[in-house]
Amino acid sequence: MSTGHNDKRHRRRLTEDERKLWSGITRAIVPLKRRRSLAHQYEPIQARGERPPPPAARARAELPVQRHAAPNPASSLAPLERRQKQRLARGAAPIDGRIDLHGKSQSQAHAALLGFLRRAQADGARFVLVITGKGGASGERGILKRQVPLCLRLPEFRLYVLAAEEAHGAHGGEGALYVRLRRARR
């Protein structure tokens, strides 16, 4: 005995008004454009004499990557320790420097951020606040909000950055990042 939602005995027929409404909705639907990941766009390069993987292995390799909702934008960087973030949010730990990137182009922001992090590390700073802004008023995410966490993962920034995480609401929330700096090499 089936108790699922697809059991025909429990379905009711749509009224004429519901059918018209549903057909209007389905006519207005536009499919979303699907982004293709780089892994699916290019075939792997094989060395001479190397056999291609068996079809079953290729099928496993071509499975789509599971995406989780709302990943941390600075996810490849280590997150701050919970206690550190709490202390920063409460003001118990000092923020040794701040940089506001509002109004800068991507290239200006990149150069300013790199110089700022270099100077802060040389001065012995442990934690800095990078203010990117939240983006446009129409709900769209700002370009610096998206790009700064990506920049922090670049090799030239990794010399200075140990960890990064979205700031507490008191320090800008979504529009700012706490950045923990590496100790300067002597």
Image (cartoon, helix red, strand yellow):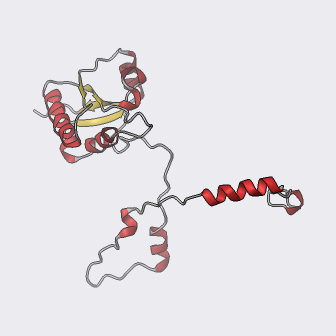
Q: Nearer the viewer, residue 184 or 77?
A: 77
Residue at 36 percent across and 63 percent down: it is 38
Pick the quarter of the image with the N terminus: bottom right
Q: Nearer the viewer, residue 132 or 168?
A: 132
Answer left or right for 89 relative to 110.
right
Answer left or right for 27 relative to 46.
right
User: From what the image shows, is residue 102 above or below residue 148?
Assistant: above
Residue 143 in the image, given as x and y percentages of width and height: 32, 42
Residue at 21 percent across and 47 percent down: it is 155
Q: Quadrant of residue 85?
A: top left
Residue at 19 percent across and 43 percent down: it is 107
Residue 72 in the image, given as x and y percentages of width and height: 41, 40
Q: Quadrant of residue 122?
A: top left
Answer left or right for 41 relative to 69.
left
Residue at 27 percent across and 36 percent down: it is 162
Q: Nearer the viewer, residue 62 or 115?
A: 115
* Tally of numbered tags: 0
User: From what the image shows, is residue 30 above or below residue 130?
Assistant: below
Residue 124 in the image, given as x and y percentages of width and height: 17, 24
User: From what the image shows, is residue 169 above or below residue 60?
Assistant: above
Pick the quarter of the image with the C terminus: top left
User: From what the image shows, is residue 148 above or below residue 179?
Assistant: below
